[in-house]
Amino acid sequence: MIHIFRKGTDESLPTLVLLHGTGGSENDLLPLAGLLSPGASVLGVRGNVLENGMPRYFRRLAEGVFDEEDLIFRTHELKQFLDEAAVKYGFDSGNLVAVGYSNGANIAGSLLFHYGSIFRAAVLLHPMVPLRGLSLPSLKEAAVFIGAGTNDPIIPAEETRELESLLRGADAEVTTHWGSQGHRLSAAEAEAARDWLGRHSNSRQA
């Protein structure tokens, strides 16, 4: 998979796995990573699927309607890539934090749904429920931050609450930040995620 890896200055920090929105690239979330966890190593990954020339992590049949077979395949593909990248770059595969926006948040959610605590924490910005009808693995060791918009034109508030419920039902620690910025990422949302991640990292290291 096309990607970028930047080794951080503090190896005790989790490696941030950056997953862009539709039409983005492996570089899109680098500025956000610098805000969330200065000094952390980062792995930005570009989606392997093209939709009208725009990179995505999996196909969809229509807006908000996922190609579930492809989503499952791409979830396993990304997990294999993360394992290979950990060996190649020497980072701890047990100390990862996902940072995903929109389509990237959805594939990160699917990784949690399939692999449990693959991430010690996940920052999901404007995610949807990736799959329904799954029996989720234990997420007792994972913490999840959800950034949501009360007026998001793509994701109804009910969908966010359904995702919260599914994650909590698998014993994940879930914190949701609500804003009124529609589907876009706002500065307030990014700062809330930074503060949450800082508290989470400190509590896990203590």
Image (cartoon, grey):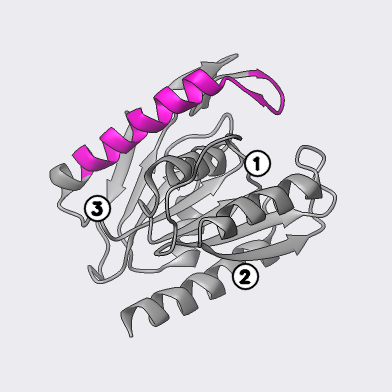
20 lies left or right of 3: right
Instruction: Judge the density around disc 1: few (<14), some (14-19), many (≥20) Cα neighbours within 10 Å.
Output: many
Q: Residue at x 70, y 58 (%)?
A: 186
* Region rendered in magenta: 61-85
The amino acid beneath tag 2 is Ala
The image quarter containing residue 169 is bottom right
Q: CA distance from mark 3 to mark 2?
A: 25 Å
State the residue position of label 3.
93
Residue 173: percent from left, percent from top: 53, 67
Residue pointed to by mark 1? 128
Location of residue 37 with respect to 149 vertically, above or below:
below
In this view, the residue in front, 148 or 4, is 148
Q: Identify which residue, 172 or 193, lies in the foreground.
A: 172
As measured in the structure, the alpha-carbon distance from the residue carrying label 2 to the one carrying label 1 is 19 Å
Can you tell which mark lies on residue 192?
2
Left or right: 81 in relation to 75: left
Secondary structure mostly seen in magenta is helix
